[in-house]
């Protein structure tokens, strides 16, 4: 199978980091599909049109990644329209920050379901096709805060740490079948959300980063592009840190 024939699915693909990943994979010749939540249909249509205007042919598909049944339906529809998924990037994520003392059960569950359970919900529905093809590339987008923790983010840190636990286990299960599974853990990245911060808040964050800047979404996309490429068939089970030296482990 040639790279141009391979289908790449990026969950949370219309977000800041997801967009950069989609565009990089499209540039590399993959048939890219960006997942979005069903409630984001209008935004996804505008996003797709903007990508087309910039020269990127990227399809979109709706699906609630926190629901196993919804993911099963989405993957079935995607397989029918594009073929089986060969490359999966689990990038969907939300935050519901709060100190643990004040954290509601709903905030805990929402973050765990979208950020962590989604990895099972999506991956379980593409895994058997990858095994049958003796080929697959999976990258889970975690976070530096999944490695070091963060005040007010016990739910988010737990979910992001759990993603790498899935990575390490699946890497062992897929190794003999030509499937690599890796994690990328970004630090602070320039996205619409971080760029919307007050200048003093953003400057305080940058001051904690040894490189004295935030990362660019394209730098995360470059890491993903290597891990899913044919140049990488022997790196599996790793947690690749892309954080400007903010956390070294």
Image (spheres, grey):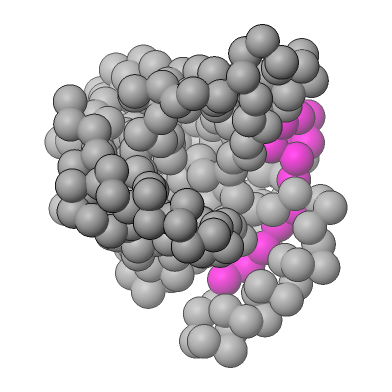
Residue range in magenta is 58-71
Q: Nearer the viewer, residue 132 or 140?
A: 140
Left or right of 231, for residue 119? right
Left or right of 182, for residue 79? right
Q: Which of 133 and 239 is in front in this view?
A: 239
Which residue is rendered at x = 70% and y = 17% of the image? 103
| Image vertical order of residue 151 relative to residue 215, above or below | above
The reply to whether residue 45 is in sight is yes
Q: Which of 158 and 239 is in front in this view?
A: 158
Which residue is rendered at x = 64% and y = 53% of the image? 35
Question: Residue 120, how many percent across, how many down?
Answer: 57, 24
Left or right of 235, for residue 177? right
Left or right of 177, for residue 58? right
| Image vertical order of residue 44 relative to residue 132, above or below | below
Question: Residue 47, how many percent across, how many down?
Answer: 66, 73
In magenta segment, residue 179: no
Determine which quarter of the picture holds residue 126: top right
Which residue is rendered at x = 26% and y = 26% of the image? 237
Question: Residue 42, how many percent across, how many down?
Answer: 82, 68
């Amino acid at each position: 199978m040639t790279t141009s024939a391979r289908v790449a699915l990026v969950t949370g693909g219309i977000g800041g980091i997801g967009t950069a990943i989609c565009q990089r994979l499209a540039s590399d010749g993959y048939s890219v599909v960006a997942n979005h939540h069903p409630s984001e249909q209008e935004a996804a249509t505008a996003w797709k049109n903007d990508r087309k205007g910039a020269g990127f042919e990227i399809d979109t598909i709706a699906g609630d990644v926190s629901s196993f049944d919804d993911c099963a339906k989405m993957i079935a529809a995607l397989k029918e329209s594009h073929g089986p998924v060969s490359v999966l990037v689990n990038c969907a994520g939300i935050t519901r920050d709060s100190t643990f003392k004040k954290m509601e059960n709903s905030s805990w569950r929402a973050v765990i379901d979208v950020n962590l359970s989604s990895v099972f919900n999506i991956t379980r529905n593409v895994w058997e096709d990858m095994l049958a093809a003796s080929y697959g590339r999976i990258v889970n987008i975690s976070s530096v805060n999944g490695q070091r923790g963060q005040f007010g983010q016990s739910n988010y840190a737990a979910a992001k740490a759990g993603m790498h636990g899935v990575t390490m286990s699946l890497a062992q299960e897929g190794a003999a079948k030509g499937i690599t599974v890796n994690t990328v853990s970004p630090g602070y990245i320039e996205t619409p959300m971080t760029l919307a911060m007050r200048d003093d808040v953003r400057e305080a964050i940058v001051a904690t980063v040894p490189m004295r800047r935030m990362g660019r979404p394209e730098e995360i996309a470059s890491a993903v592009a290597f891990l899913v490429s044919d140049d990488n068939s022997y790196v599996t089970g790793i947690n690749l840190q892309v954080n400007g030296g903010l956390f070294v482990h």
